[in-house]
Amino acid sequence: MKHLKEYLSITVAVAMTAAALPVEAKVQLPQVLSSGMIVQREAPVKLWGVADPGELIQVKVTDRKNKTVGARKGVTTVAGDDGKWSIELPALKAGGPYKVTVNDVTLDDVLSGDVFLCSGQSNMELPVARVTDMFADEIADYSSNEVRQYYVPREVEFHAPLDDTKPTAWKPATAENVMNFSALGYFFAKQLNERTGVPVGIINSCWGGTPVESWISEGSLTEFPRAINEKRIYEDDAYRAHVKKVEGENYARWNAALYAGDPGLHGAKKWYAPDLDDSGWAKVDILKGTVTDGTVTGDDLHNGWTGNLWASDGLNPVNGSHWFRKNVSLTSKQAGRPAVLRLGCIVDADSVYVNGTFVGTTSYQYPPRIYNVPAGVLKEGDNNVTIRLFSQNGRGSFVPEKPYKLILGNGDEVSLEGEWRYRLGAPMVHGPGMEFWCYKPVVLYNSMINPFVNLPLAGVVWYQGESNVSRRNEYGALLKTMIADWRDAFDAPGLPFYIVELADYLHPSDKAGRAAWAEMRKVQADVAGSVPDAVLIHNSDLGEWNDIHPLDKKTLGARVVDAVTARSIKK
C-alpha cells in the first residue's frame, strides 16, 4: 500500500506539472542517444536526458524479434527538480539490432559493440574522400551497417561544459556516407569489425590545427597558468565579436587592394584569356622554381630576384598574386569531353582557369587541387591552363612529388609539370592575422568532449601533436593531464588511450625541423610508456615528407586494431 501511495503521488505531481504547461513536453535525449547508435558491449547501457520535473521515465528494450530484453516491463526513473534524469540498463549482448523506447521516444536500429572516441587534429579529421587516390577501389567495394560514425559538429564554448552537441546523427559506412568518415577511424573500425565480428562505432570528435590544451577541461589546467590566462583574454563574447569584426575589415581591405592592384584582372585582355600574348613572360619550372628563359625585372618581380626564387625578392617572400600559364595541345579524340585537372598542392591558395573558364579555387595549402573541367571547354589544338596563385604570409610554391596533370575523358593523361610562363600580378604586404577560437584552451573540451562523458567506451584513439611541436617541452605534461582529465570525466580510470605517433614530415634538408618532430615523437613515446593503459601506435614510417597529411591511413588503422586486440588478449 505504501508503494502504491508513493506511485499515485508521483502520478498526481506529474499530472499537475503537465496541466500547468501549454503543451506537454516530450522526453528529450542528447543527440548521441539516437536511432542508429552503437552502445558499448559488456558495459551498462546509460541513458540520460531532460523532461518535465518529476516526470516518470519508462525505458524498455526489445530485440529483433520484438522480445523484451531484461525486465519485462522495463525500468523506470523520475526526472529531478531540474528536469534532468539518467538511468542504467544491463549490458546488451553484442549485435542487434535493438529497439529502445523512452516514454514516447523510440530509438531504432541500436547495435551493441565497441565504441571508440577518435579525437585530435587534422590527421584524425582527414576524411575518406582525401585518401581515395590510394584506396578508391577498396572504399567503393565496401559497405557495412555494423561500422558507424557519429560526427561531432565543430563548436567552441568558452563559458561552461555543454551537455549536448549541435544536431547530428549516427551514420553507417555506406556509399552515401563514407566519404565524410574520418579516414583513420574508417579503416580502424572496418578492420576491427572484420577481425572481431562485433559492431564498431566511432565518435569522430576532432578539429584541424588544434593544440592539446583546447581539449582539456579548465579545472585540469590549473597547473598551466599560461593556458588559463590565454583563455581569459578571449572569454568575453563582445570582445571576440569585435576581434572578428576587425579581422573581417582587414581582410576585406587586403583583398580589395589585391584585386585593384592586379593588372591580370583589369584592362582589355585578362591574363586568363586563352589568346593572351604571354611571349614576354618569364619561363619558370613550377616544381624546381628555376627560370629557363626570359628576363625578369621591373613589373615582373622585385629587383634582386634570381634563379629559383620566383616567390622571393632575394631576401623576403613576395606576397600577393602570381600568374602562371601553360598551353597543351590535344587531338580531336581528347578534346570536348569532361576532364579532371590535377594541380598537386599549392601554397597558399589559387584560382584556376581553363581556356578562360573558371574551374575551381582552393583557399589554403593542404587540400589536393582536383578540378573538374566541364564538357566543351577543351578543344582540338592548343588549350590554355592559367593559375592565379595567392601568397599571403609565406613563400608561394607548388609542392613537388604531387600529381600535376590533365586527365582526359578518353583516359589519356597530359603532364603539366615543367615549364610555365610566369608573371607577378600584385605584390602585397603580408595578409592580416587571424585568431582561431578553436585553438584556445578548454573550448573544445567544453563543446566536443563533455557531451559524451556518460558514455561507456572501449577506448580513445588520439592523433594530435603537430600543433604542439613548437612547445614540445611542455607537451608531455599536457598530454598526461588530458588523459587523467578524460578518465576522471568518463569515470573510467583504466580507459585505454591509443596515442598515434606523429608521421615523418619535412624535407631531408630541413634538419632543424625534422629534429623537432623527432623530439616530439620521443615525448609521445615517453607518455605512452609511463601512463598505465596507454599505447603508442607506430606511425613515423608512414609519413610523406611533402605532406603533413599522409594518405596511408589503412596501415595505421591496422596497427591500432593490433593494439586493441592485443590488449583484449591480455585481459
Image: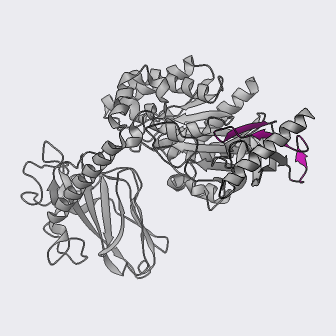
413 is within the stretch colored magenta: no
- Judged left or right of residue 303, residue 154 is right
Q: Residue furthest top?
A: 530
- Judged left or right of residue 231, residue 418 is left
At 8% from the left edge and 60% from the top edge, which residue is drawn?
299
- Judged left or right of residue 185, residue 458 is right
So how many labels did they put on this image?
Answer: 0
User: The N terminus appears in which quarter of the rendering?
Assistant: top right
87 is within the stretch colored magenta: yes
Q: Is 451 drawn above or below residue 172 in the view shown?
A: above
User: The C terminus appears in which quarter of the rendering?
Assistant: top right
| Residue placed most toward the observer, 465 or 317 | 465
Q: Is 419 drawn above or below residue 486 in the view shown?
A: below
Q: Is 27 drawn above or below residue 456 in the view shown?
A: below
Q: Which of the 4 image quadrants contains residue 268?
A: bottom left
Give the image's coloring scheme: one colour
> In x, y percent, where is residue 386?
28, 67
> In x, y percent, where is residue 186?
61, 47
At 19% from the left edge and 57% from the top edge, which residue is drawn?
253
Residue 542 visible in the shown view: no
Q: Which of the 4 image quadrants contains residue 560?
A: top right
> In x, y percent, where is residue 38?
71, 45
At 23% from the left edge and 48% from the top edge, which residue is drawn?
432
For the magenta stretch, what is the residue range? Answer: 64-89
| Residue placed most toward the observer, 183 or 135 | 183
Residue 488 visible in the shown view: yes
> In x, y percent, where is residue 480?
51, 22
| Residue placed most toward the observer, 133 or 212 | 212
